[in-house]
Amino acid sequence: MSIASLPLAPPEEVGLSTSRLKRLTTILQKDIERGLLPGAVALIARRGRLPYFECLGQRDPASRSPMQRDAIFRIYSMTKPIVSVAAMLLWEEGQFLLGDPIAKYLPEFAAPQVAVERDGTVTLVSAKQPITVQDLLRHTSGLAYEHRGDGPVQRRYLDAKISRRNQTAAEHAATLAGLPLMHQPGTHWEYSRSTDVLGRLVEVLSGQSLGAFFAERIFEPLRMDDTGFHVPERNHGRLAEAFARDPESGAEVQLLAVREKPNFESGGGGLVSTAADYARFLEMMLGQGARGNTRLLGRKTVELMTADHLGPISGAPDLLMPGYGFGLGFAVRRDAGIAPIAGSIGQYHWSGIAGTNFWVDPAEQLFAILMIQAPNQREYYRVLFRDLVYAAIAD
């Protein structure tokens, strides 16, 4: 399998080392043999060519089916950059300004309140400023994620069953609007359900469901034929699965149910995709908004999205490493050093909770994707994969 407009190439022809890429393959294969990973698909593109596209291990450890390059993965939060592009398509049409209050389009967010905890007592105070569209894109809305703590806001999210699959995007946004914020808008980077609300904004502005907008405006133009909010029955045999129990903790592993179309098309984490499909999306991003003759975004729009939008605003260091800021849908590297992971200034990335991850490095004309379904091992392989890919750069 190849990818249209990305021809295969020997590694040395694009400045990579064959022997060092084999090191990457060997390490992943050994971890598969040790039972730490069920399987993996890894892809590296550089200078417009494809020097590395490997599949290893098992697609489904229960059936012992071998991994294939076209395996379909639950990409969870790698959905977020696609929603961000969807929103910026509408921004380019003049349908909103980044500084607009989201209440202009989602009136249920007209009077947000912020939870303040002092001495074990929680009080609600009015937000000092509205949540803006930019806040949703850069995760400074004040919204939260229920799985990232046990504070009063997260507990209210759990009580409201905010993650239930039988709701609609409109119902989800309305429920969130009735819950308190964790921080004052615009003051703190808090990874959150902001992108779910952004997805609802896309629906309201476009008059389409999020899935329909994706299909028409992004997936069809980029030929992302296997990306969507569920896996059709004809492709169930391509779906990648995790171990039934985590190989380190022994805990049961449950992944998102994606064999049937959901009511809630979650912009924060509902998509499935393949390495080849996501490569088409990243090819567009690295191409400054264009893939081949197909242009989705303008060059300056991509530059805006992949610039830092936080400045002095800080956030959770487990997701936003030192040396990184955050743009409009992507973490963005601001410093050559500081972060304990290889990279270049201007590199941008994101990942999914089940283990999938990607990054784009414009300075090196490179992007890379690792697709795995191993939730508890994800942080280790995010770093390992990136370090080993950079170690393979020869010129």
Image (spheres, rainbow, N blue to C red):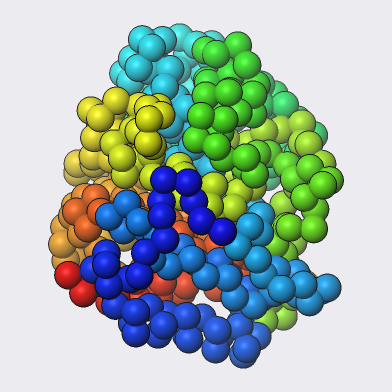
Spot occupied by residue 213 in the image (x, y as percentages of width and height): 58, 23
Q: Is residue 15 visible?
A: yes
- Tell me: 140 left or right of 233: left
- Tell me: 185 left or right of 158: left
Query: Relative to the observer, which residue lies in front, 87 or 364?
Result: 364
Which quadrant would the C terminus be assigned to in this image? Answer: bottom left
Query: Relative to the observer, which residue lies in front, 12 or 337?
Result: 12
Which quadrant would the N terminus be assigned to in this image? Answer: bottom right
Spot occupied by residue 4 in the image (x, y as percentages of width and height): 47, 46
Picture layout, residue 210 above or below residue 194: above
Give the residue displayed 43% in from the left and 17% down from the top.
Answer: 90
Spot occupied by residue 70 in the image (x, y as percentages of width and height): 63, 57
Query: Relative to the observer, which residue lies in front, 371 or 255?
Result: 371
Occupied quadrant, residue 108:
top right
Spot occupied by residue 277 in the image (x, y as percentages of width and height): 54, 47
Give the residue displayed 23% in from the left and 28% down from the top.
Answer: 300
Give the residue displayed 51% in from the left and 29% down from the top.
Answer: 221
